Amino acid sequence: MHVVAVLALDGVVAFELTIPCLVFSSTPGYEVRVCAERSVTATSHGQESFRVSSRYTLKDAVDADTLIVPGIEPGTSPSPKVLKLLRDAAARGTRIASVCTGAFVLAYAGLLDGRKATTHWIVADDLAKTFPQVTVDPSVLFIDEGQILTSAGVAAGLDLCLHMVRLDHGAAVAANTARVIVMPPQRTGGQAQFIEHPEPDVDTNDLTPVLQWMQDNLDLPLTIADIAAKATMSTRHLSRRFRAQTGTTPLQWLLDRRLQRARELLETTGLPVERIAQTCGFGSPETLRHHFAKHVGTTPRDYRAAFQASGEMISRSAGTTALESVNR
């Protein structure tokens, strides 16, 4: 059983405290512990909401496989006990993640030094100025630095937690969990699509029909000109509108979707790599392997060997859990 310890620190943002609890308790194979140093105040945008107490203390987080720090009110300094817990966990190789302003806690512990990290775009400058040794990227939903992971503002914690489920058990299991909590398995773009820009010079009309058309035609050798023609606009105008809505470029969005589909097929089918490459629009196994090595960090064959057996087993269990939940 994979133990996930969620730290309830004083000033914890209530919604962000519940995010990892919801995701991991909705997925078979995890034990969730909310660990508090004492009875703490949970807040919502600076307003006191309720007190949080738990039967789990910081000591119960010591043997956790994953340790998650939800957001806290900016300016709240973690206690020495919390900092020691995080540093000792990092030294043991524990996976450590933060949600939103929880990144400040990791930074106070020195765990983000020399790393890339993200947080809510509103306080990203504060994080960068307070901890200059941290490379802060406010444009993404989450950053995976291996042992240390950080997510952007509020709901981006859902994206990060689903990402960790995907790493542990594969895309099929993550998709099942996403269905249970009723959200997309993987959102596109980043915080850039939510940041307020003065005097925007782009037309943000909805591109959803074009996105769906691209998703439905992953096997075709689509070009930027093909996508622009479907959207009935110039390639330059398409690129501006696409970034405004998704936070990325048309071809990068297409590549992300193709990789996601390839991972799903590798996990859930016995199709040969050659067929998967064609089905997902990579054209050849060599191109698929190139992109897998660059973006996934392994080969399609090794990915299948690592995830297919456990993914199919847990997927069936997750499907049963979801059905039982609906029936109740």
Image (cartoon, rainbow, N blue to C red):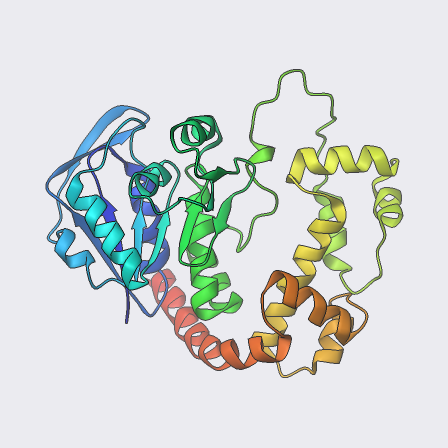
Looking at the image, which residue is at 49% across and 37% down? 136
Looking at the image, which residue is at 78% across and 59% down? 217
Where is residue 61? Give x, y as percent: 20, 57
Looking at the image, which residue is at 61% across and 43% down? 189
Where is residue 192? Give x, y as percent: 59, 34
107 lies left or right of 47: right
Q: Residue lying furthest top in this view?
A: 199
Q: Which of 300 and 280 is in front in this view?
A: 300
Where is residue 111? Give x, y as percent: 35, 47
Q: Is residue 116 above or below residue 185?
A: above
> Which image quarter: residue 315?
bottom left
Q: Confirm whether residue 43 shows in the render.
A: yes
Quadrant occupied by the N terminus? bottom left
Where is residue 30? Give x, y as percent: 31, 66
160 lies left or right of 79: right
Number of callouts: 0
Q: In this view, does 155 lie above or below 213?
A: above
Quadrant occupied by the C terminus? bottom left
Q: Confirm whether residue 6 shows in the render.
A: no
> Which image quarter: residue 83?
top left
Q: Which of 216 and 123 is in front in this view?
A: 123
